Image (tube, rainbow, N blue to C red):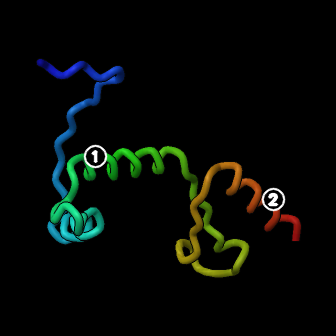
Amino acid sequence: MPRKAALVPNKHLHTTIPPELAAKLDLFLWSEVEGRVPQGAYQAFVVRAIREFFTLREMDLAPYLGESEGLFVVKGTLPAIEALQRKLEEK
């Protein structure tokens, strides 16, 4: 019996990554119970990373700390970043 079609079909995406990054990802996703990277683990990781990319915002704290740009960067949701910025600008 054929599998039912997904309500929201996925788009097939093929890509490659550098070997050292692939090794780190394999170690992170590895399941001792299954003795391998579980089925769907790569997809779940990539989907989560893409959603995070489009959801989170970055803020460089350099102007507030008197440090070089790019050394102290925080990431959070837009409301969290806005609240942090308001708090830092109060002083």
Residue 43 x %, y %: 28, 46
Residue 67 x %, y %: 63, 81
In space, the residues marked 2 and 1 are separated at their CA atoms by: 37 Å
Q: Residue at x 33, y 52 (%)?
A: 45
Q: Quadrant of the N terminus?
A: top left
Outermost residue on the right side: it is 90
Q: Is residue 60 left or right of residue 41?
A: right
User: What kind of element bears circle 1?
Assistant: helix
Residue 7 in the image: above or below residue 48? above
Q: Amino acid at mark 1?
A: Gln
Is residue 21 at all visible to an observer of this figure? no
Q: Around disc 1, counting alpha carbons within 10 Å, would you say few (fewer than 14), some (14 to 19), or many (20 or more)?
A: few
Q: Residue at x 68, y 57 (%)?
A: 81
Q: Which residue is mark 2?
A: 86
Q: Amino acid at mark 2?
A: Arg
Q: Around disc 2, counting alpha carbons within 10 Å, would you say few (fewer than 14), some (14 to 19), or many (20 or more)?
A: few
Decide which of 33, 39 is in the foreground and name it.
33
Q: Residue 43 shows which numbered tag?
A: 1
State which mark lies toward you, 2 or 1: 1
Q: Is residue 25 left or right of residue 83?
A: left
Q: Residue at x 55, y 51 (%)?
A: 56
User: What kind of element bears circle 2?
Assistant: helix
Q: Is residue 62 left or right of residue 25?
A: right
Decide which of 86, 25 is in the foreground and name it.
25
* Snapshot quadrant of residue 91: bottom right
